[in-house]
Image (cartoon, rainbow, N blue to C red):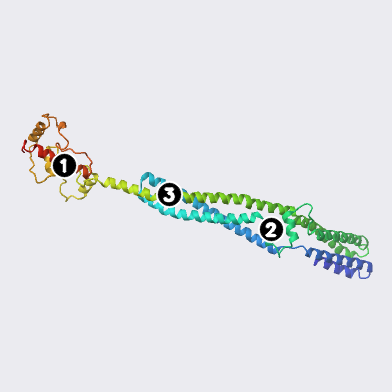
Amino acid sequence: MQVDLEQHLARLGEIFAARGDYLQTLKFLHQTAGSIIVQMAGVPAWTGVTEQLTELANQTSYVEYYRWLSYLLLFTLDLVLCLLACLGLAKRSRCLLASMLCCGVLALLLSWTSLAADAAVAVGASDFCAAPDTFILNVTEGQVRPEVTRYYLFCSQSASSPFQQALTVFQRSLTAMQIQVAGLLQFASPRFPTAEKDLLGIQLLLNSSESSLHQLTALLDCRGLHKDYLDALAGVCYDGLEGLLYLGLFSLLAALAFSIMTCLGPGAWKHCARRDRDYDDIDDDDPFNPQARRIAAHSPSRGQLRSFCSYSSGLGSQGSLHPTQTVSNAPVSEYMNQAALFGGSPRYENVPLIGRGSPPPTYSPSMRATYLSVADEHLRHYGNEFPA
């Protein structure tokens, strides 16, 4: 309107300089185009609001991507820690339990942090969803007229569009201009053939403007934007809040689970330590002790380990326990003495446990003291009757 139409009207003014009625028609076209420009200037472009919405959408997409990635890593960490805890308890490994406790404390902190973040976002979203229309009216105040904002927020059938007047003036002005141009084409073209090109150009411009008017009317209609607004509200206030509640529930359960695991960790640690002490309560001189055999194998310079059991004689085994006594090297006589002492049976199996020097394969120091006391009692009771 401001460029192409002005050029066509300027050339037609030179061509129709001798005809005053045609110049009046050109003046009418110029005034009508001016009124159309004034009416269309009142339609807001909303460039600032559009830029803000675009920036908000980009920031939301950026934050959502990293939120999804962080929660995926947190879920994976929780799963790995649970498997590590189960494996450590099954194998009673103190190393795995220590690793689980250290990482469990980190996961506990992350779980409480995610729970706090989810709660904060859920509270903010709940406040927005309680009155979204009021919030948007307050935010857009000073940038968009309130009647325009309400038109798109509510979009009732009874409400009239705030742009209806401008669009109506545009439509009527275009129709009047098209009628005037058609009259000039019909009556002025035969007399001024050079004016036909500019008149056709004006007619083409008016037709394209009418097509743009229909597109603008459809874009300014509230139904499309209102539908997008309702979809956004449903996504934020229903699906978004529900997802935040699920994430908060998971964070709470994970925090409680890791709190329990952290509290039970020292108990499991003590259980594993007690189990190790039970295995360490074995005499180093026990020939059936695997550790003693390993020590003897790695330390050949160490003297021969004294065996608590002797398969040659009962008194020989007692002599190994009491080095100060004289040990007899007569296995046959000792065997016969023992046979006469314990019922006269020549069976070696009837000889008592201490007398025949065959203690259990594994025993504790307390058990050894018991055997020694029993051996001393036998020596005192039968020492005079059966001298060595």
Give the spatial CA distance, label 1 vs label 2. 95 Å
Is residue 105 or residue 52 the one in the foreground?
A: 105
Disc 3 marks a residue whose amino acid type is Met
Quadrant position of the C terminus in the picture: top left
Disc 1 marks a residue whose amino acid type is Ser
Tag 3 residue: 261
Residue 293 left/right relative to 156: left
Disc number placed over residue 31 in the picture, else none? none
* Residue extending furthest toward the top: 345
**For the image shown, how many numbered marks are present on the structure?**
3
Q: Are marks 1 and 3 in contact (CB under 8 Å)?
A: no
Give the spatial CA distance, label 1 vs label 3. 48 Å
> Which residue sits at x=34%, y=47%?
271
Task: State the SS at label 1.
Answer: helix
Task: State the SS at label 3.
Answer: helix
Tag 1 residue: 373
Q: Residue 227: where, in percent of width, then height? A: 71, 51
Give the spatial CA distance, label 3 vs label 2. 47 Å
Is tag 1's residue or tag 2's residue first in the polypeptide sequence?
A: 2
Is residue 345 or residue 172 the one in the foreground?
A: 345
Quadrant position of the N terminus in the picture: bottom right
Question: Please, is residue 33 above or below residue 350 in the view?
Answer: below
- Please name which of the two marks, 1 or 2, marks the residue nearer to the observer: 1
- Residue 316 location, quadrant: top left
Residue 50 left/right relative to 211: left
- Residue 10 location, quadrant: bottom right
Tag 2 residue: 134
Is tag 1's residue or tag 3's residue first in the polypeptide sequence?
A: 3
> Which residue sits at x=43%, y=53%?
103
Q: Residue 283: where, in percent of width, then height? A: 21, 46
Residue neighbourhood size for the residue with mark 2, other residues' Cα within 10 Å, grouped as few (<14), some (14–19), many (≥20): few
Q: Residue 308: where, in percent of width, then height? A: 16, 42
